[in-house]
Amino acid sequence: MKKYRKRIKQPYAVILLRLTFLFTCSGLFSLSQTTEAQTRRVIPFMTGGINLDGIPDEEIWTKVENFPLVMHSPNSGKIPEQNTDVRLFYDDMYLYMGVSAYYNDPGTITRIGKVRDYTGWDTDWVGVSLDTYNDKQNIILFGVNTNGIRTDGTTKNDLINGFNDINFNFNTFWDAEVKIIGNIWYTEIRIPLSSLRFQGNADKVIMGMTILRAIANSNNPDYGHITWPEIPQVKGLMLFWKASMAEEVEFTGMKSRKPAYLTPYVIGGLNRFYDTDASAAKTDYKIEAGADFKYGITNNLTLDVTANTDFAQVEADQEQFNLTRFSLFFPEKRPFFQEKSDVFDFSFNSYDNLFYSRNIGLYSGNPVRIYGGLRLTGRVGEWDLGLLDMQTAKFEELSGQNFGILRTKRTFGKSYLGGMVTSRIGSEGNYNIAYGIDTKLNLFGDDYLHVKWAQTFDDGADNKIFSVNPSQILVKWENTRIKGFNYEFLLDWSGDSFNPAIGLETRNDFFLKSATLRYGWIPGKESWLNAHYIFAETNVFNSSVDGSLESVATAAGWSFMSKKTTEGLFYLGWEVEDLKDTMFLVYPDVFIPQGRYNFFSFFGNLYTTSPDNFLTLTLTPEAGTYYDGYRLSASLLPGLNIGSGLKISGSYRIDRVVFNERSQQYTNNIFGLRAIMMFTTKLSFTTYVQYNTFSHRIITNARVRYNAQEGSDFYIVYNEGIDSSDRVNFRTDHGNENRTILLKYTYTFAF
């Protein structure tokens, strides 16, 4: 990201004029939508409720129609050998779902995972996904596994970016119970209407809905994913969470209750650290409190207010070693920013985005106090709305910052039109404003046109509204089917003055031309392959300043997914890099002089899971020439599921670069070990240990979580960072750079 510049006076009337111009232009796009008359499944309104004990045996269930499920993968369209009885109804308070999942052999029932929001595919699941606004873009999903563990999440952008568009850190209030008796797994799910945001008239509410049953054991004849409605695999894989694939259902007279939740927290602990200016370790004590408040203003709008926000329980970032000359991407892990994150998405190519939440409350990897803020999300008329405003404290040389985001989006069919404005204003008067307009148009069939345009203005630049220099523009045409021929063509241009101070730019001042061609097969029931495709792609980067060539990346390869336990991706690549300046890998010893370089590489990714779900293994080798030397990289990710309550995963990555002509070489190793011990469905212990030979740091993060009930959590968190280099004595306090132990308790009051 470009430097956040200091203040040069700029009339705020100009800024207001630009914002007014944006929304005036957005308002000109009044798009009408015609809907074909169709017969929808009506979810019945019933009174009487149920006894939530896990078994749908009350008389009320017999009055509700069953939903027939069909295989999605690996054998698309097959009628399952084992029955799944699924029924839904609702009353004034809740949406109910009852499931009876039958097994020919009860020995194939897989029971792994006991911690809230467990998302592994190594266990059996049932669930329902709801496109509550019927916008064909976003859904909220609810799932429960055979241990009774609840997982909820949201998706965005109709899963254009695959699993990157799924957020499992979203949590809301709902209940589920399970029972396994003989060869039948029973489930009852109860979702408060107050946990669903939806829009409808006085007579009916229309939502998109998908029902999923997932069977993990590959020895089961119905191994894979079974759905209602039938979702042909020719449309793509894992489409049960794709909003545009959901079936429209109707709720007659459904009315939402307006929720109000107050969640205060208290935190206490100590931090022991070594200050290089002192001869002994120091200890800081921490006692703080804060609160979050959630209120449903209308059926369609939810207000979240946070005060003195703290994220002590969040896991540490994964260590990385950068072999490129561009910024690394670290995902957001803080719950407040992950909830409803789909509303604020304005993404370009790769990880570039007009809003990157890690700019709030983090500075150079250090946490910055967040005094508080608010978030308003939902729908006004035909427009989706997201409003966020947060204030942070002063930290070192960084002044206190106010962050503001306003996002709007109008959906029509499988298309949308949207706009976004962001602001970052320092307490010393420096500011940065960004705004943009984006659209996705379903041209015909599976062909889509994406157009995004954004501009930034700040007090340290020559701001001209009709100049392309402070702009980024993206145009992409893609075909999304997976069977047969499909393609993607992209143009992405970023000017030398484009500077989204609240966003993310992994690369600056570029003009990208990209083309990808694919051909896919779905071999059918007799093949060991579920789906596979070949592809070729080319990416050419030029400077947007002088047009000179910066990079070329070309690759061709094969990707496959078997019907049992293996996935793979293999390709050969050719790259051109034109370095304008010396590139340091390890300063000052290992570097690459300026100049133009050509090099080739091989990349592979192989993922396997044993049929008994005990062992998982991912192997990713990469080798080839590298600038004027060569490179060997490899990642190994083993995982073990031991019983239903212990999951261990390891990670090892090695990067070795050698430049014989300059007698330079370097080898970096990153080790990681994560263990999750799930003692009960309420009590779990998680630990994550990492070691990076580049930074010589050993990082330990350990957490105990007791989830007494929904909205009530007690955490014990231990963090430690140790410098293991030769310059310190590992056995003294000088080696323990930071050691923290914290206790955090939250409790939710519902009104």
Image (spheres, rainbow, N blue to C red):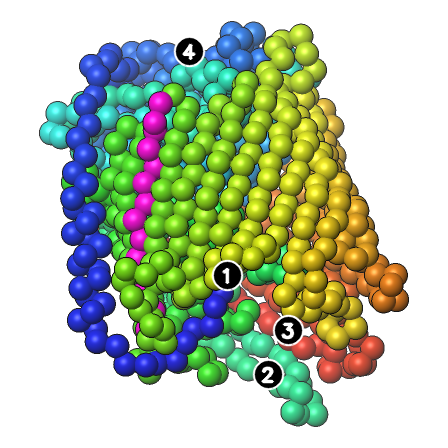
Q: Is residue 437 magenta?
A: yes
Vertical side of 78 occupied by 587: above or below? below
CA neighbours of label 1 inside 10 A, class few (<14), some (14 to 19), many (20+): few
Mark 3 or mark 1, earlier in chain: 1
- Please indicate, yes or no, whether residue 647 appears anywhere in the rendered image: yes
Q: Report, in whole angstroms, how far the alpha carbon at label 1 lies from the one at label 4.
A: 60 Å
Extent of the magenta region: 431-444
Asked if the residue at tag 2 contacts the one at tag 4, i.e. Cβ–Cβ closer than 8 Å, the answer is no
Question: Nearer the observer, disc 4 or disc 2?
Answer: 4
Q: Which mark is residue 283?
A: 2
Left or right? Give the position of 587 relative to 76: right
Q: Which residue is mark 1?
A: 546
Q: Report, in whole angstroms, how far the alpha carbon at label 3 lies from the one at label 1.
A: 49 Å
Asked if the residue at tag 3 contacts the one at tag 2, i.e. Cβ–Cβ closer than 8 Å, the answer is no
Question: Nearer the observer, disc 1 or disc 2?
Answer: 1
Q: Which residue is mark 3?
A: 739
Left or right? Give the position of 653 relative to 332: right
- Element type where label 2 sits in the image: strand
Residue type, label 3: Arg
Residue type, label 2: Thr
CA neighbours of label 4 inside 10 A, class few (<14), some (14 to 19), many (20+): some
